[in-house]
Amino acid sequence: MNYRQIIADSWKYTQSNKRLIIWFGFFSCLLTTTVGVGYIAYQFFAFKSSYLFTSEDHSFLSQVVGFIIAFIKENLSLTVPLVVFGVIFAILYFLYPTLSKAAAIQIIARNKNGQKAGIGTGLRNGMMSFLPLLEYHLLIKTFGFFSILLEMSFVLRNLGPVLFKIFLPIFILLIIIGFILTLLFTYTDFYIVIDDEPIFSAMKKSAKMVIMHWKYTFLISVLMLIIGLRIIIQVVMVFLIPALIVLITGYLATVTLPVTGVIVGGTVGLIALIGAAYLTGIVEIFSYTVWTYTFLAVTQEKELTAREEAEVATEHEEIEQSNLEP
C-alpha cells in the first residue's frame, strides 16, 4: 500500500467531486461550525462573567435566560417561528452530519470500486447504516477531545481552580484514553457503513486491524495529522468568526449608528461562517476519502497465521514491503 499515492488520489478525487463537497461537506460543516461558534461565544462570555474576572454574583446563563424571557414578552409574534426554526436546526445538527458521513463513505467506496454512485445513491445506502453509526458516535463522543475541554471549563468556572487542579490528572488521563480509543477505532465507521457490521463487532475489528497492521503506523499517524489539520482549521475559524462580529459591531457602534454596526458585523460574520464551512467541508471530504481508500486497501490484504509456510510468508512479506515503499 503506497500511502503517498493514496493521499494524492484522494486529493484528486476530492477536487473533481464538487457536489460531494457541497452536499456532504459544506452543509454538514455549516451546521457544526455554527454550533461551534455558539459554544465558543458562550464559553467566552461565561468566563468573562464568572468570578474569575468579575465580582458579579449572577452567571452568564441567568443573563441569557433573562434575555430570552424578555425577548419573548416583547416579540410574541416571532416566538413561534423562532421556536420552529430552532427545533428544525437542532434536528439537522444532531442527524445530518452523521448521515452525510455515511453517504459520503458509500459514494467514495463505490466509486473506488468502479461503481457509478451519485448523491441519491449515497443517501439511499447511507440511510441503511445511519442509525448504527449515530449510536456509535453518541457512544464514543464522551471521550472526544472537545467534550473533555468543555467539562474542564465547566469545572474551572463553577468549582474553582483548587478543585480544577485536583481533577486535572483525571482530565489528562481521559484525554490520553480518548486519543488511544480514537486510534484503535479508526476504521469503525467504515466497517459499519461499508461492511454493515454491528457496532461492537466493528469496534473489535477496527482495533484488531490497527494492532495487526503495525507496519502502517506511520500511515495512520499521517492520517491522524490530516484529521488534526481539519480540527485546527475549524477551531481557528470558530474563534475567528465571533471575534470578527464582536470587534466590528463594537467599533461601528461607537462611531456610527448601533443598527449599522449590527448589520455590518452580522454580514461579515455570515461571510466568514460560509467561508469557514466550505473550507472545512473540503478537508472533511478529503479526510473521508483518505480513510476510505486506506480501509479498502488494508482489508484486502491477507493476514498471515502461524500455519503459513515460511516461503509463502516470506514472499508475502516481500510484496507487502514493496507496497509500502513510496
Image: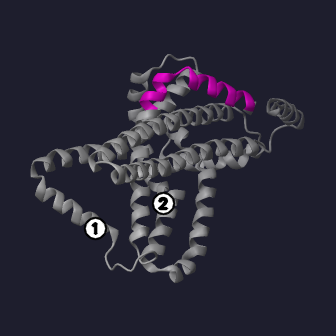
Q: Residue at x 48, y 60 (%)?
A: 147
Instruction: Where is residue 243? Give x, y as percent.
Output: 46, 52
Three-letter code, disc 1: Gln
Residue bearing mark 2 = 147
Instruction: Where is residue 274? Give x, y as percent.
Output: 42, 36
Q: Residue at x 17, y 57 (%)?
A: 71
Three-letter code, disc 2: Ser
Q: Which residues are magenta?
A: 4-24
Residue bearing mark 1 = 63
Residue closest to the eye, 228 or 106: 228
| Residue 27: in magenta span | no
Query: Which residue is situated farthest in the front direction here?
Result: 255
**Residue 60 drawn above or below residue 239:** below
Prevailing SS of the magenta stretch? helix
Determine the secondary structure under disc 1: helix
The Cα–Cα distance between marks 2 and 1, rounded to whole angstroms, is 24 Å
For label 2, the crowd category at 10 Å Cα-Cα, with few meaning under 14, some 14 to 19 and many 20 or more, is: few
For label 1, the crowd category at 10 Å Cα-Cα, with few meaning under 14, some 14 to 19 and many 20 or more, is: few
User: Residue 179 vs residue 252: left or right?
Assistant: right
Query: Which residue is situated farthest in the bottom direction here?
Result: 162
Q: Is residue 1 visible?
A: no
Residue closest to the eye, 269 or 31: 269
